[in-house]
Image (tube, rainbow, N blue to C red):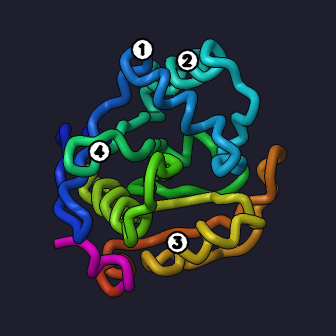
Amino acid sequence: MTAVVPWTGRTRVGAVTLEPLDVDRDLDLLHAWVTHPRSAYWLMQGASPAGVRDAYAAITADPHHDAWLGRVDGVPTFLAETYDPRLRELTGRWPAEEGDVGMHVLVAPPAADPVPGLTSAVFAAVVRFCLDLPGVRRVVVEPDARNAAIRAKNRAAGFVEHGPLDLGHKTAMLSTCTPEAFAASQLAGVLS
């Protein structure tokens, strides 16, 4: 899956762009985001900058896994990852299909007053980005089953939960979203 980058979409909170993550350029932001207490489900609490660099250098070098820096009106605001679930994350644990793309999203903890609707706008933009990738027929997510907030956000974007799935390091709530389900979802309306 080759993305047209930088990808840009309009939302109610501003222009959202996604560009390939540059591990060296973005390391300070990345480290602060993935180790923040609010990012506990990202499973990188206590990681050193070198550990974060190594993890994301491996992702950016992987032909089946990509990392994206997301901006809102030019300001770095979120991290997204896309992956082929047939070859990463769900290999041997769930029958992913041709045309599936896996997605992870991490919105940066706010540095100042939170922007109302920011997380929904970012989430909707990332789903749209994934669905815009060539050949994609379905977006797949596997959040920790205990993460009620992201599960609710997934459902608001049209994801259907298929039940818990043991991934070894967590029990995930495997969920999928088709273009039709996203178009009919509550979150599709935040895109303009």
Q: How many marks?
A: 4
In primary-sequence order, the first of circles 2 and 3 is: 2
Q: Quadrant of residue 135?
A: bottom left
Please name the residue shown 56% across and 28% down the image: 31
In primary-sequence order, the first of circles 1 and 4 is: 1
The answer to the question of whether label 1 and label 4 lie on touching residues, with beta carbons closer than 8 A, is no
* Image location (x, y in percent) of residue 7: 20, 46
Q: Is residue 8 left or right of residue 145?
A: left
Please name the residue shown 49% across and 23% down the image: 28
Residue topped by disc 1: 24
Residue topped by disc 2: 53
Image position of 181 with respect to 138: above or below: below
Image position of 168 with respect to 129: above or below: above
Disc 1 residue type (three-letter): Asp
Disc 3 residue type (three-letter): Asn
Q: CA distance from mark 4 to mark 2?
A: 20 Å
Q: CA distance from mark 2 to mark 1?
A: 8 Å
